Image: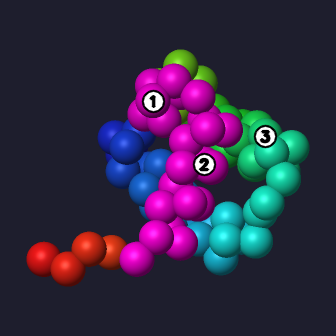
Amino acid sequence: MKVIDDWLDDKLSARKMVLGYVEDASEFSMLAGALRAEAQAAGYHPNALAKACGGDICSYLMQVTRGADTPMAAE
């Protein structure tokens, strides 16, 4: 079994296109619920997912989406 952080990164990478079109907070809440259910089905405890998301899965998804729209800084 993968570490929850790696699992989460993989799931978010697979949903990158979907997350880009989500605008309403209720949609993020629905996606957070689906992600929580997938994590449980994969054998992860819901608290582990919440911890990997900084305590709030929905807010984390919103931050990730906003971050995807932000241009990367030049190194």
Circle 1 SS class = loop
> Quadrant where the C terminus lies?
bottom left
Circle 1 residues within 10 Å: few <14, some 14–19, many ≥20 = few
52 left or right, relative to 33: left
> Residue 32 occupies which quadrant of the picture?
top right
* Count of marks, rendered view: 3
Please tell me which residue is depicted at 76% across the width and 47% down the height of the picture: 28
Foreground residue among 48 and 25: 25
Amino acid found under the numbered disc labelled 2: Leu
In the image, residue 1 sits, relative to residue 20, either above or below, namely above
46 left or right, relative to 22: left
Q: What colour scheme governs how the chains and residues are painted in the rendered image of this protein?
A: rainbow
In the image, residue 12 sits, relative to residue 48, either above or below, namely below
The tag earlier along the polypeptide, 2 or 3, is 3
Q: Main secondary structure of the magenta part?
A: helix
Is residue 62 in view?
yes
Q: CA distance from mark 2 to mark 3?
A: 9 Å
Q: Which mark is residue 54?
A: 1
Q: CA distance from mark 1 to mark 3?
A: 15 Å
Amino acid found under the numbered disc labelled 3: Ser
Foreground residue among 10 and 40: 10
Residue denoted by label 3: 29
69 in the magenta segment:
yes
Q: CA distance from mark 2 to mark 1?
A: 11 Å
Circle 3 SS class = helix
Pick out the residue farthest to the left. Answer: 75
The span shown in magenta is 50-71
Q: Which mark is residue 61?
A: 2
Q: Position of residue 46 (x, y in %)?
A: 59, 24
51 left or right, relative to 60: left
1 in the magenta segment:
no
In the image, residue 74 sits, relative to residue 61, either above or below, namely below
